[in-house]
Image (cartoon, helix red, strand yellow):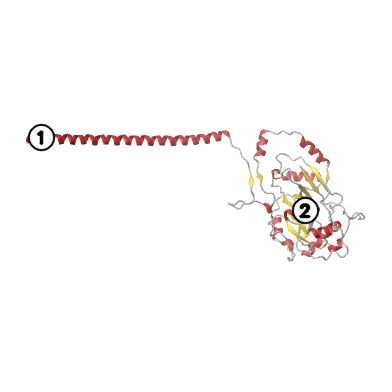
Amino acid sequence: MCVTLVFSTKGQRYLRVGLAVPLFGSLSCLRSMVAQEGNISPDQVILSELYSTGFQRSFSDDDDMTVIADSDVIYAFQAPPLHSRGGSTPHSGYHHSLPSSPYTSNAGPDGQRLPSSGTLSSEYLSQGGSTKVLLVICNTAGSGQQAVRFGPPFLMREDRSISWDQLQQSILSKLYYLMLNGSQAQNAGMLFKIRVVGGSSNYSYLSPQDSRPLYHTAVDRALKFCGPGGPPHVKVVIEWENKIKECLFGSIQEEVVKDAESVRNQKQQHLQQHSCTLDECFQLYTKEEQMWFCVSEMWFCVSCRCGSVCLRCGSVCVVDVVLRVGDVVLCVLEMWFCVLEMWFCVSEMWFCVSEMWFCVLEMWFCVLEMWFCVSEMWFCVS
């Protein structure tokens, strides 16, 4: 399995690693392996699907490895550490894991920063008593199935009490160094839409009219459904109109990911023949499999309206099958004997009716004989 690591440190960028996950491993095992590969804490790892159209699922430690297919594109994000007030860790105006701007070559080691007129991220504000939320963000041109992701994904920790303008400026500060002309984005009003992944497409957009958009019910729902393992987070897709995207970013594509040596090693091992026991084969074949890929495309059962649809193939013992078939045969034989018994009863009734008919005929002959005797006596008297 290949996983793309996204580091939040300054010196490391994007790295795709190959991992040999145990046959019946869990997501907690995968999270630990990713953390060991990246030399980070497992509590910092966020496992999520990221495709050309944006985010889809996130994974928790309760999930099994069977929920991930070989074709799924898995990203492992390193959550940035919390910085306490008065700490010595400096903040920059952009995300450290992003690569250098493709349009500037004279940027210093700290990258391009906002001009003096820009609004800094709320991470620069007072952090005492604030409620922060971790946002995992990617950018797309367009929306829905026509969306095309561009630029690198990144993480951002924001105060939930900030306004729409502050949130927009904070996002722009992370993307400023990627822009062709960042000054065009200043004081430009609403430049993009913000969609929270994990809810209905009609109700998951943050509204610019909300005084505190990060307190939207879609954000609460996304945080509520974060399972154990990894920090609570909210996946967000920034949707740009194609015209605005071309004006600000040009023809920028997705991030460039470097393959580690383990990727080539895993590919070579994958080409080799592997063996497993018959018991392991049956366990894999009969393991439960989820049949949905993202909440917005979830299929709901028409009977119970349940959205967590799963598929599981089962096997039964041959002895149980034989016993059940035997029970069916016995039931059929019992029914057949009942039919025969009814037939004998009907036959007996028919014989009784026939005997009664013969008795009636005998009585009739007796009456006729008596009649002849009476007639004969009458003739004699006459």
How crowded pointer 1 is (Cα within 10 Å; few <14, some 14-19, many 20+) is rated as: few
Check the picture and name the quadrant holding the N terminus: top right
Asked whether the beta carbons under mark 1 and mark 2 sit within 8 Å of each other, the answer is: no
Against 369, is 47 above or below?
A: below
Residue at screen point 46% across, 36% down: 332
Q: In which quarter of the image is residue 356?
A: top left
Asked which secondary structure carries label 2, the reply is: strand
**Residue 350 placed where, x, y %?**
32, 36
Given residues 258 and 44, the one toward you in this image is 258
How crowded pointer 2 is (Cα within 10 Å; few <14, some 14-19, many 20+) is rated as: many
Q: Which amino acid does label 1 sit on?
A: Met
Q: How far apart are marks 1 and 2 (CA)?
A: 125 Å
**Residue 360 placed where, x, y %?**
24, 36
**Residue 195 placed where, x, y %?**
73, 58
Asked if one can make out residue 56 in the rendered structure from this viewpoint, the answer is: yes
Q: In this view, does 318 lie to the left or right of 215?
A: left
Asked if one can make out residue 233 in the rendered structure from this viewpoint, the answer is: no
Residue at screen point 66% across, 39% down: 285
Q: Mark 1 points at which residue?
A: 377
Q: Mark 2 points at which residue?
A: 148
Given residues 96 and 190, the one toward you in this image is 190
Check the picture and name the quadrant holding the C terminus: top left
Against 68, is 213 above or below?
A: below
Q: Which amino acid does label 2 sit on?
A: Val
Q: Nearer the viewer, mark 1 or mark 2?
A: 1
Q: Quadrant of residue 65?
A: top right
Q: Which mark is residue 119?
A: none
- Going by the picture, which residue comes out furthest to the left? 382
Residue at screen point 74% across, 54% down: 146
Asked which secondary structure carries label 1, the reply is: helix
Total marks in image:
2
